[in-house]
Image: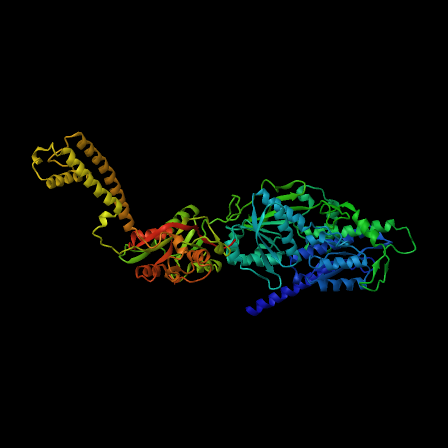
């Protein structure tokens, strides 16, 4: 059975090859004339475009030549014929085959080449021998320079115009940025350059530029990492159809197509090569390609077009598609051929000198040394040519190699049509009317099968985020809980898990939270983001200039500053006379003197008026006077006797006033003294550390943190003379065990630690080095 199938397959292959040869052989063999046009086509085996592209272009080229014969267009009585050569994408081979044709035939014009990379050398040869080179597919913007390429023309619009059309498309949809992917040849690099310049001129942003290597047929960059880490979700792909298919296959494998990314292609591709399971991811793509004038309701030469189609159907009917499916580049090829034919006819009609042919060459046997005598007149004729072609109006001037006007584009959208995936035209563009709807029926289907215009910015809805978190009290803590099955499970609690939950509810992403190993330093977290180990890292990570140079940060999630943390002072000094410290020694002596002096005055004033004590001794009276003065001075008073004389009463009033002043002053000073004694520390703030009140080897610094950066920058001048700490637990143990005297700590964590866990530690002075914590994200 297998052998039988193989025989049938072999038979079909032989018949297919025979049929192809038969179709090719049906074109008439034109070898009777000495006037020939050389057309350079790309070898189908090495084509960057589709096989259909080459077949259609060659058919329309030959149809134009045969049509000229049917219209009886002759040059000095001879018909124009064709010479076809194929190139393989290498400039040296293109020039070799061109020279071979020029050396063996009377080539008076070159159509092609297809590739922008082959065009400069062929255009240079055309300038050297004085014949025009007209391309129907080379779009490199650098080829527009008339001074650099005086013998070159093209009927296909330049990529400069395509770039302007794409910019206007971005403006239409309010998009502001994109990523450009291009193949690394003249076509891809030239298109990317033109698009970048157009973006800059219109205040749009090219977020990144990626390269597809046509030699290795691989992306040079990590497509997934760069696209997923970018803030834009718009991708412009500038590549030929063959390379576009390879790049899209890579994108499918990396999962960077729909519904999260919108791709804009510079060429359409066959969608049959993709597995049907991936079709949903292809929906919503756009392509921007040149078209002919009648698509935008501008005039074309339908008479020429129908005549060319009839010739094609006559000589190669099996390759002729529906007239609406003819490749537009084939129509550019027809106009390039017809331009050469018309220019030759007009040139020779002007030549009146019958002594030599209007198509005379010198040194005609050599490729590089031959020269067309009427080259200047030939170029001048083309520069002033103006006719209506099958692609639109054809006109050139001496300032540029591009056609004047006649540049049109359309946008096709990948969507389901007739139960299959197709490119459907949705927008059309002309330089006069800008972008317009292609038809009222065809609506744009965006990625995700949506009718809602994408913003072009990164969205996290439905995106899985690998989030790294750092265990740091109180931001991220591990709690052990018992589940419904009686098993102990761990749960992350704290500020960061709550923040992630809040962001998840608002942004609808799918979090995959992983606790980062405690062995990682804060500095090493930056490398984890650079290496794409995590999508983002959330924790008490300070935003610094050094870190910003490597990665990006979100807006502040927590305002922070550094604090000095140290042990509480535990030494207690016993002093029997501590109660006297609120007042100075001199003041105590003054108070004692006041008591003695006031007692003497009181004794003198009241001695005769206190009946029970009149008979007492003078010593007893003095003692009672001292008692009276002391009692009133301290606010206690004396109940056994009172002042009776005016002098005694005045003295008593003075003692009351003095009592108020002394008691208030004593109370205030005593409270201040007690407060100071309880909060007495070696230093009072960061300035004391800067002034050297703490030995550098007694200052503990957590390695790889913002506090280390601050110490090196502001205190030690880059000298790592501190006591290095590897973890916060080592910091706490070092302080409690008197290994270090002070350390620097983030304010939020330090306040929680000193109030709830390590009550023997305290914060000193005001915060310093104000900053903020941010979410670590990859560099854009």
| Of residues 201 and 657, the one drawn nearer to the viewer in this rendering | 657
Q: In the image, is residue 617 above or below residue 674?
A: above
**Residue 38 located left or right of residue 674:** right
Color theme of the render: rainbow
Is residue 561 visible in the rendered image? The answer is yes
Question: Could you tell me residue 22's position as x and y percent?
Answer: 71, 61
Is residue 82 visible in the rendered image? The answer is no
Question: Could you tell me residue 166's position as x and y percent?
Answer: 62, 47
Quadrant hosting residue 490: bottom left
**Residue 598 located left or right of residue 548:** left
Question: Could you tell me residue 711's position as x and y percent?
Answer: 43, 57
| Of residues 775 and 113, the one drawn nearer to the viewer in this rendering | 775
Quadrant hosting residue 729: bottom left
Q: Residue furthest right?
A: 355
Question: Could you tell me residue 383's position as x and y percent?
Answer: 79, 48
Q: Quadrant of the N terminus?
A: bottom right
| Of residues 90 and 302, the one drawn nearer to the viewer in this rendering | 90
| Of residues 255 and 635, the one drawn nearer to the viewer in this rendering | 635
**Residue 546 located left or right of residue 23:** left
**Residue 729 located left or right of residue 289:** left
């Amino acid at each position: 059975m297998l052998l039988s199938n193989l025989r049938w397959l072999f038979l079909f292959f032989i018949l297919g090859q025979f049929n192809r040869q038969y179709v090719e052989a049906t074109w008439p063999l034109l070898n009777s004339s000495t006037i020939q046009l050389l057309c350079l086509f790309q070898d189908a085996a090495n084509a960057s475009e589709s096989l259909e592209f080459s077949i259609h272009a060659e058919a329309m080229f030959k149809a134009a030549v045969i049509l000229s014969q049917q219209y009886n267009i002759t040059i000095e009585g001879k018909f124009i014929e064709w010479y076809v050569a194929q190139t393989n994408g290498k400039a040296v081979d293109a020039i070799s085959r061109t020279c071979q044709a020029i050396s063996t035939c009377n080539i008076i014009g070159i159509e092609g080449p297809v590739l922008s990379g082959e065009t400069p050398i062929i255009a240079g040869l055309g300038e050297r021998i004085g014949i025009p080179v007209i391309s129907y597919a080379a779009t490199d913007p650098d080829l527009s320079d008339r001074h650099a390429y005086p013998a070159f023309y093209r009927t296909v619009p330049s990529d400069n115009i395509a770039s302007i059309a794409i910019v206007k498309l971005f403006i239409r949809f309010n998009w502001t940025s994109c990523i450009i992917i291009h193949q690394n040849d003249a076509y891809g690099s030239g298109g990317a350059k033109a698009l970048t310049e157009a973006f800059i001129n219109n205040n749009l942003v090219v977020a990144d530029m990626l390269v597809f290597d046509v030699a290795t047929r691989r992306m040079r960059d990590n497509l997934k990492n760069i696209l997923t880490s970018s803030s834009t979700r718009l991708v412009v792909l500038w590549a030929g159809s063959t390379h576009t298919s390879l790049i899209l296959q890579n994108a499918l494998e990396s999962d960077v197509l729909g519904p999260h990314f919108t791709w804009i292609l510079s060429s359409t591709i066959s969608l049959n090569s993709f597995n049907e399971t991936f079709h949903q991811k292809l929906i919503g793509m756009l392509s921007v390609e040149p078209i002919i004038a009648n698509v935008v309701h501008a005039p074309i030469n339908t008479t020429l077009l129908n005549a060319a189609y009839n010739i094609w159907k006559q000589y190669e009917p099996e390759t002729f598609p529906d007239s609406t499916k003819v490749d537009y580049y084939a129509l550019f090829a027809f106009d390039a051929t017809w331009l050469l034919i018309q220019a030759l006819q007009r040139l020779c009609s002007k030549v009146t000198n019958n002594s030599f042919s209007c198509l005379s060459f010198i040194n005609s046997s050599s490729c590089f040394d031959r020269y067309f005598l009427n080259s200047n007149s030939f170029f001048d004729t083309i520069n002033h040519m103006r006719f209506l072609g099958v692609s639109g109006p054809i006109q050139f001037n001496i300032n540029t190699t591009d056609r004047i006007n006649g540049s049109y584009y359309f946008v096709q959208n990948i969507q389901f049509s007739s139960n299959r995936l197709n490119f459907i035209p949705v927008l059309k563009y002309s330089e006069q009317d800008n972008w317009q709807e292609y038809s009222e029926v065809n609506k744009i289907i965006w990625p995700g099968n949506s009718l809602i215009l994408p913003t072009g910015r990164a969205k996290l809805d439905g995106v899985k985020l690998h989030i790294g978190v750092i265990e740091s009290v109180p931001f991220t803590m591990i709690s052990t809980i018992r589940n419904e099955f009686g098993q102990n499970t761990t749960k992350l609690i704290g500020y960061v898990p709550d923040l992630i939950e809040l962001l998840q509810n608002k942004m609808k992403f799918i979090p995959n939270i992983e606790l980062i190993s405690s062995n990682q330093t804060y500095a090493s977290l930056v490398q984890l983001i650079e290496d794409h180990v995590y999508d983002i890292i959330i924790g008490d990570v300070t935003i610094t200039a050094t870190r910003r140079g490597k990665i990006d940060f979100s807006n502040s999630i927590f305002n922070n500053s550094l604090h000095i943390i140290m042990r509480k002072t535990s030494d207690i000094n016993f002093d029997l006379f501590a109660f006297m410290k609120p007042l100075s020694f001199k003041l105590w002596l003054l108070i004692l003197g006041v008591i003695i002096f006031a007692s003497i005055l009181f004794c003198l004033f009241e001695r005769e008026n206190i009946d029970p004590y009149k008979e007492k001794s003078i010593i007893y009276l003095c003692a009672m006077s001292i008692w009276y003065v002391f009692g009133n001075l301290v606010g206690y008073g004396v109940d056994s006797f009172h002042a009776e004389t005016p002098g005694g009463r005045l003295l008593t009033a003075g003692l009351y006033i003095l009592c108020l002043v002394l008691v208030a002053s004593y109370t205030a000073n005593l409270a201040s003294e007690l407060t100071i004694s309880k909060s007495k520390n070696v230093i009072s703030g960061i300035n004391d550390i800067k002034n050297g009140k703490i030995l550098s080897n007694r200052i503990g610094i957590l390695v790889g943190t913002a506090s280390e950066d601050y110490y090196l920058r502001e205190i030690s001048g880059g000298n790592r003379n501190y006591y290095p700490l590897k973890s916060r637990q080592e910091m706490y143990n070092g302080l409690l065990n008197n290994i270090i005297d002070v350390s620097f700590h983030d304010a939020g964590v330090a306040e929680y630690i000193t109030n709830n866990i390590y009550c023997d530690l305290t914060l000193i002075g005001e915060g310093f080095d104000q900053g903020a914590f941010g979410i670590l994200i990859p560099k854009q």
